[in-house]
Amino acid sequence: MGLKNDDERAREEAIELTDTPMIQRVRELVDPIANDLDLDVYDVEQRGGTLRVTLDTRPGTQASVDLEQLSLATRLISRELDHADPVPGRYTLEVTSPGVERSLRTPAHFQREVGKTVSVRLANVEAEQRRLEGVLVAADERTATIRVDSGRVDSGRVDSGRVDGDGEPVDHVIDIDSIDRARTVFVWGPQPKPGKPGGRKQTASAKGIRQSVPDQSFEERS
């Protein structure tokens, strides 16, 4: 068995920290709160001493999660976690929204972003085409299909190497388990302007609103 590189170890660690009984229990507690606020739980992660709950609007909704919603969600989630106590030790609760360019880790993430431009890096460092960028045209519980335009050349990428004989776009079907990193890509055009709904990632903290560039956040320490 060969030695694992840094990317592979980081990927395994991320999976472990986002798919544990504790994380699953937190999601069970947060789901009803998000549903009452007409929001979805996009992700739940633990990174060191931070428990991050990412909330998003329902698929098809044009507006993004606003700070008022995040502030209310932070208070409700904090109260529920204090009562159920699913997280051992001290931690900082962060309630956030995913923003325009969002990480894609789970089949559900890919399924809700169908139709958007995505960037994917495969875990296999020896893959002929390790990096792909194109339109996510389909996704299910196991695979994601990315349509790559013919003739697309991007420095440092190999996503333009496979085109058919007619120069038409090619659909790449990728096993989600084989993906190291993936995210949506903001495309200039008919997109929300900065400051408009959906234009920035929003984060909230029960201690008050603070702005950093480009994010805003609400956090509460437990």
Image (spheres, rainbow, N blue to C red):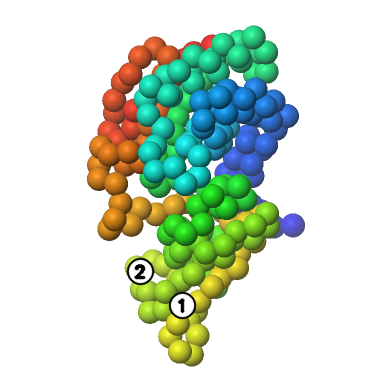
Q: Is label 1 in a helix, a strand or a loop?
A: loop
The residue pinned by badge 1 equals: 169
Q: Is residue 195 visible?
A: yes
Amino acid on which the number 2 mark rests in the picture = Asp
Q: Is residue 26 visible?
A: no
Q: Quadrant of the C terminus?
A: top right
Name the spot of residue 16 as percent of width and height, x first.
66, 38
- Depth check: give the residue in front, 40 or 217: 40
Amino acid on which the number 1 mark rests in the picture = Pro
Image position of 154 (left or right of 38): left
Quarter of the image where one finds residue 177: bottom right
Can you say whether 154 is above or below 37 in the image? below
Q: Is label 2 in a helix, a strand or a loop?
A: loop
The residue pinned by badge 2 equals: 154
Image position of 173 (left or right of 183): right
**Label located before the other in sequence (1 or 2):** 2
Name the spot of residue 130 as percent of width and height, x first.
52, 65
Name the spot of residue 48 as percent of width and height, x first.
55, 26
Can you say whether 177 is above or below 45 in the image? below
Q: Residue at x 67, y 13 (%)?
A: 84
Q: Quadrant of the N terminus?
A: bottom right
Name the spot of residue 23 as percent of width and height, x first.
65, 29
Q: Are marks 1 and 2 in contact (CB under 8 Å)?
A: no
- Depth check: give the residue in front, 42 or 157: 42
Q: Residue at x 63, y 34 (%)?
A: 17
Disc 1 to disc 2, how far (Cα)?
A: 15 Å
Classify 10 Å Cα crowding around label 2: few (below 14), some (14-19), many (20 and above). few
Q: Residue at x 73, y 29 (%)?
A: 21
Q: Residue at x 60, y 59 (%)?
A: 139
